[in-house]
Amino acid sequence: RDAQESRGLGDVYKRQVTPSPSETTAIGRKILQEHPGTTGSLGCAISEAVEVATSTPGYRYVLGSVLNQVLLHQSVIGLETKAALDKYNIVPDIIIGCAGGGSNLGGLISPFMGEKLRGEKDYRFIAVEPASCPSFTRGKFAYDFCDTGMVCPLAKMYTLGSNFIPSPNHAGGLRYHGMSSILSQLYHDGYMEAVAVEQTKVFEAAEQFARIEGILPAPESSHAIRVAIDEAMKCKETGEAKTIVFGLTGTGYFDMVAYEKFHNGEMTDYIPTDAELEASFATLPQVPGQD
C-alpha cells in the first residue's frame, strides 16, 4: 500500500503498517536502489513478505493470487454465482472480471469455463486489466518469476517481466506484472478475451455505479464495472438483449484519496511505451525453448 493508506490503516488497527518497497528488508532496499522513488507493486510486496517469512522462525507465506490453489479457493465465488443464476433460470451471455494476478477472475468464471470446455454451454469471458499494467493485452506468454525480487519459483504466464513496476495509480491488486498460469493458458488458447482500460475511465464508471446502486466500489472492481457498462451500451446501440455478469470484488472506502484525486482533476492515465515494455522483456529468465 502507499504511504498515506498505510498510515490510515495503522491508525485504524493500532498497528504499524509499512508501505512496500521498504527499507526494512534486503529485497526492499535493493528494489528502492534500482527504482528510486518507486511506489512499488504487488510483485515488490510479495518479495518482501517472502523474505520476512523465510527469515523469521515459525512463519510461513502463502501467495494470495496467481497460483492454482488460490483460484481453487476463489471458485466458491463462481459456484455461488452459478447456483444463484441456475435458481432463477438465468444463463449469462457475458461474464466479466477484473484481472491482476487472476484469483478474482479465475474464481468467478471457473464453473462456467468448465461448461464451455466440456462443450455444454458457450459463454463470452472478458478479463479487464489496467492499461498501466497490461499483462494479458501487451505481455508475453513466457516463464517468469512471480515476484520482483526473483525469489519465488518460475511460472509460465502472460507477463510484462518481473522487473516491471507500473506507474503510480489506483488499480489496487491489479498492479501485478504477471497473470495466473491457468488463466494465461485459457487466454492463449482463445477461450477468453482481455481488455485494458485507463484509470480515469474506471473512476467514471465507479461513480456512475455508486450513484445508481448506492455501493462505492473499489478501484480494482471498477475495472470490471467499466467494461460491463461498455458492453451494455453496445447492446443498447444494436438492440440486442444480453445478460451480463460481472464480479464486484470489494468496496472503495479505503480508497477515498483516489476518489478525491479524480474529483480534483489530479488523476492522469499513464500507458507504458513499447520501449519500456521491451526493456522489461529483456530481463525475462533464459529458459530453453522460450521465445
Image (spheres, grey):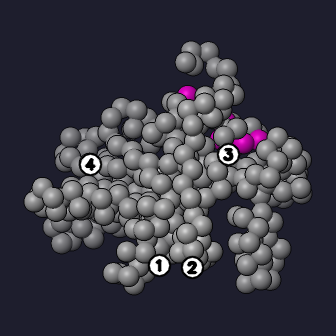
In screen coordinates, is 117 left or right of 1? left
For numbered disc 4, what is the local secondary structure?
strand
Let me know if residue 176 is in the magenta part.
no
Q: Please state which amino acid type lies under the numbered disc 3.
A: Ile
Q: Which of marks 2 and 3 is nearer the N terminus?
A: 3
Residue at point 28% right, 67% down?
83
Residue type at mark 1 is Leu
Q: Mark 3 points at which residue?
A: 165
The relative height of residue 215 versus residue 271 in the rendered view (above or below) is below
Do the residues bearing badges 1 and 2 touch, measured as CB atoms within 8 Å?
yes
First in sequence: mark 2 vs mark 4: 4
Q: Is residue 92 visible?
A: no
Q: What is the magenta range?
A: 142-149
Q: How crowded is mark 3: few (under 14 residues within 10 Å), some or many (20 or more)?
A: many
| Residue 181, above or below 57 | above
Residue under numbered circle 4: 124
Q: Mark 4 vs mark 1: which is more N-terminal?
A: 4
Q: Do the residues labelled 4 and 1 touch (CB within 8 Å)?
A: no
Which quarter of the image is occupied by the N terminus?
Answer: bottom right
Residue at x 52% of width, y 35% of height: 139
- Nearer to us: label 4 or label 1: 1
Q: Is residue 147 magenta?
A: yes
| Secondary structure of the residue carrying numbered label 3 | loop
SS under mark 2: loop
Q: SS for tag 1?
A: loop
Corner quadrant of residue 288? top right
